[in-house]
Amino acid sequence: MSRTDQTPVVAGLLLAAGGGRRLGNRPKALLEYRGRPLVEHAVRVLRSGGCAPVHVVLGAAAQEVRDRADLTGCALTVNPGWTEGMGSSLRAGLGALAATDADAALVLLVDQPGVGPEAVARVRSACGSRTGLAAASYGGERGHPVLIGADRWADVAAGAVGDRGARAYLRAHRDALVLVECSDVAEAYDIDVPEDLKRLD
């Protein structure tokens, strides 16, 4: 770790750049959840789960998100290549974090409101060093959030293309990956198509 104390700094990294193509081009960050933009909810989840600082990667309708959502205290990165998929947003976020003293990044997706602070805290607790690698597990299946130690960021970013994000890296390093069961405290559904919107009520 980078400091004399033994408590790792785990930054929250929220990927919120998606344009919601299958939702009729409704940017996911701006979907309404409990009366406020979904991106605000996800930021609260990261903070309540113990992540600080919180970095948010925006893309689709980035200026509108800035105008409508309260992202006070968050570091914002706009990904100009957001249409390329989640991989480009992960690269942008890890690149921004590289200039900080964070020991790890805990990656959360804005379109998974069923993942709350309890799951974030569990996965965050798996960070013991800058080489840490952990992910939430749902009935044995790997999901989000994902924790990536800082010493791994460059290699993760190098393989983050299209919509794969860190998937290829996690598969290649499965022996080092700690799976943290979260199915008792979270639901890992995505808001991807119009029928999913009922989960936001």
Image: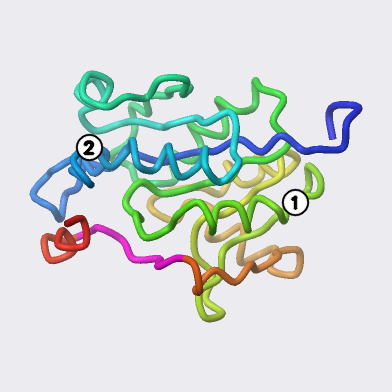
**Closer to the camera: disc 2 or disc 1?**
2
Which residue of the protein is positioned furthest toward the right in this rendering?
Answer: 4
Relative to 143, is 158 on the left or the right? right
Numbered disc total = 2
Q: Quadrant of the C terminus?
A: bottom left
Which residue is the site of mark 2?
A: 36
Query: Neighbour class for label 2 at 10 Å: few (<14), some, many (≥20)?
Result: some
Q: Is residue 15 above or below residue 76?
A: below
Query: Neighbour class for label 1 at 10 Å: few (<14), some, many (≥20)?
Result: many
- Percent across and percent down for residue 107 are 52, 46
Which secondary structure, mark 1? loop
Disc 2 from disc 1: Cα separation: 34 Å
- Percent across and percent down for residue 177 are 70, 64
- Percent across and percent down for residue 114 are 37, 60
Which residue is the site of mark 1?
A: 132
Picture residue at 21% right of the left edge, 55% below the top: 200
Q: Hey, what amino acid is under mark 2?
A: Arg
- Percent across and percent down for residue 129 are 81, 45
Which secondary structure, mark 2? strand
Q: Hey, what amino acid is under mark 1?
A: Gly
Residues at circles 2 and 1 in contact by the CB criterion of under 8 Å: no
Picture residue at 45% right of the left edge, 54% below the top: 116
Picture residue at 21% right of the left edge, 62% below the top: 199
Picture residue at 61% right of the left edge, 47% below the top: 156
User: What secondary structure prevails in the magenta region?
Assistant: loop
Determine the image quadrant of residue 43: top left
Q: Is residue 12 above or below residue 24?
A: above
Which residue of the protein is positioned furthest toward the left in this rendering?
Answer: 24
Considering only order in the chain, which callout, 1 or 2, is on the residue closer to the N terminus? 2
Q: Is residue 74 above or below residue 20?
A: above
Confirm whether the magenta stretch covers residue 73.
no
- Which region is colored magenta? 186-192
